[in-house]
Image (cartoon, helix red, strand yellow):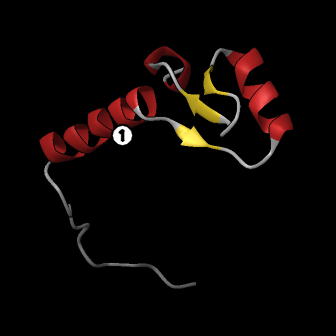
Amino acid sequence: MFTNTLPKYNYLPPAAIEQIHETSLMVLEKFGIEFNHPDAVEILERAGAQVADRETNLVKFPRELVLR
């Protein structure tokens, strides 16, 4: 068995990781994601996501839904 003896490397400071996380939550909430599968849109809507445009299947995700 091999064991990695190298020290762990932190690629980003915790504050930068938190900033990336907060920005991703904002993007999902403000801009959303377009889905190509109508069944997926229905499932997400039942879970609490907001269907912002049914023609393009644009779904926005409230912060609370993502953090569940």
Rendered residue at 16%/46% (across/down): 16
Place residue 35 in its image quadrant.
top right
Which residue shows up at 45% across the image and 79% down it? Answer: 3
What type is the residue that disc 1 sits on?
Answer: Ser
Relative image position of residue 46 (x, y in whole percent):
77, 16
Q: Residues within 10 Å of mark 1 (few under 14, many from 20)?
A: few
Quadrant for the N terminus in the image:
bottom right
User: Which residue is at the front of the view, 4 or 18?
Assistant: 18
Residue at x 72%, y 27% (from the top left corner):
44
Callout 1: SS: helix
Q: Report which residue position mark 1 lands on.
A: 24
The C terminus sits in image quarter: top right
Quadrant of res 48: top right
Farthest-out residue, right: 39
**Residue depicted at 20% across the width and 64% down the height:** 11
Q: Position of residue 21 (x, y in %)?
A: 32, 39
Residue 13 % position (x, y): 13, 50
Q: Quadrant of residue 28?
A: top left
Q: Is residue 52 above or below residue 12?
A: above
| Residue 50 placement (x, y as % from top left) | 60, 19
Task: State how many labels appear.
Answer: 1
